[in-house]
């Protein structure tokens, strides 16, 4: 049975992720050979659930899957031992390709990503999924399925108990309108939404709506804006693959807060976890012990 304090990661547009390491740097229009291939269940919520579990917390992946890719997705989650609530839908679960340049497994930098759009919004499947979500803190993560009506996403959020939302654009706007407990935009997403500097926008958003903001800043760290305002600088690391670092950061922050850690401590550990994810090579290689070590190298700034 699901635990009452479970973190339920609901991802509107799950994916089957293929990460390929190439024999050399990517050159468009030329032949490349694959020297390494990893296939995994993908989506922001899956990465978040992995991070929560890495720290010993209870997590559950929720979403709609379909077709042969959906079957493969289910099998991969089961192989990882990740608890899940998946609803069968129409169409084929999308595939997302990530290309890492160079044959050196330690090659640094962000991969080239090629993401399918995925099947269109399926109201029936979504309604069935929402009807049997386990009890816990629901976190809605990632991009919306194609053709999702804005009102449908807003209604879904309003039907949940003060969810946490990690989305962008229209999804971020809907989260604020629905009274989410917390949103997690990155600087670019929040600035695109408001047209103002990210931290100033986060303060104003909280003042107007009461929605807390966990603002991620990539290699520079993160900030929390609520009744308290805290900023944490990330440690300097060698980046192997930063994909999923924001998801890992959010999952760690929620787990730490759920366990009673203060906002500053939770934010420091979360920033360290995001850094560990990038340093180790992504969510499948993330380790909580490395995050705890890196936490000592984060820098907590005086509340602004």
Image (cartoon, grey):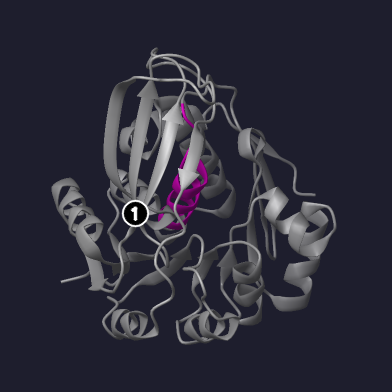
Q: Read off the residue under disc 1.
A: 49
Residue at image coords 51%, 49%: 266
Could you tell me residue 13's position as x and y percent?
41, 63
Q: Hey, which quadrant is residue 160 in on the image?
A: bottom left
Could you tell me residue 34's position as x and y percent?
32, 22
Exactly how many numbered labels are in the figure? 1
Q: Classify residue 209 as left or right of residue 284.
A: right
Could you tell me residue 51's position as x and y percent?
36, 46
Q: Nearer the viewer, residue 63 or 196?
A: 63
Q: Quadrant of the N terminus?
A: bottom left
Whether residue 6 is visible to the viewer of this picture, yes or no, is no
Residue at image coords 62%, 38%: 218
Q: Nearer the viewer, residue 126 or 120?
A: 120
- Based on the picture, tell me whether residue 237 belongs to the magenta stretch: no
In the depicted structure, whether residue 207 falls above or below residue 29: below
Please state the extent of the stretch shown in magenta in the rendering: 241-256
Could you tell me residue 117's position as x and y percent?
47, 59
- Based on the picture, tell me whether residue 242 belongs to the magenta stretch: yes
- Give SS at disc 1: helix
Q: Classify residue 67 as left or right of residue 100.
A: left
Residue at image coords 40%, 28%: 281
Whether residue 68 is visible to the viewer of this picture, yes or no, is yes
Dominant secondary structure, magenta:
helix
């Amino acid at each position: 049975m699901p635990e009452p304090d479970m973190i339920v990661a609901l991802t509107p547009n799950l994916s089957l992720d293929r990460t390929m390491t190439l024999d050399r740097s990517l050159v468009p229009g030329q032949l490349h050979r694959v020297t390494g291939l990893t296939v995994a269940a993908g989506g922001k919520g899956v990465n978040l659930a992995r991070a929560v579990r890495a720290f010993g917390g209870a997590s559950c992946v929720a979403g709609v899957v379909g077709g042969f890719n959906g079957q493969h997705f289910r099998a991969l989650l089961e192989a990882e031992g990740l608890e899940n609530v998946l609803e069968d839908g129409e169409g084929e679960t999308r595939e997302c390709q990530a290309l890492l340049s160079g044959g050196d497994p330690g090659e640094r930098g962000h991969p080239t990503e090629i993401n399918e759009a995925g099947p269109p919004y399926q109201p029936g499947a979504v309604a069935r999924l929402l009807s049997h979500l386990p009890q816990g803190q629901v976190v809605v993560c990632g991009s919306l399925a194609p053709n999702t009506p804005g009102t449908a996403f807003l209604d879904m959020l309003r039907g949940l108990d003060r969810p946490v939302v990690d989305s962008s654009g229209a999804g971020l706007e809907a989260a604020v309108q629905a009274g989410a407990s917390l949103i997690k935009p990155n600087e670019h997403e929040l600035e695109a939404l408001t047209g103002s500097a990210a931290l100033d926008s986060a303060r104003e958003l909280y003042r107007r709506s009461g929605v807390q903001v966990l603002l991620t800043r990539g290699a520079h760290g993160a900030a929390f804006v609520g009744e308290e305002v805290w900023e944490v600088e990330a440690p300097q690391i060698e980046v192997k693959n930063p994909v999923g670092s924001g998801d890992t950061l959010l999952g760690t922050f929620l787990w730490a807060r759920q366990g009673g850690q203060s906002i500053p401590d939770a934010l420091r550990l979360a920033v360290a976890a995001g850094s560990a994810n990038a340093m180790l090579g992504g969510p499948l290689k993330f380790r909580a012990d490395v995050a705890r070590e890196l936490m000592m190298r984060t820098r907590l700034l005086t509340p602004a």
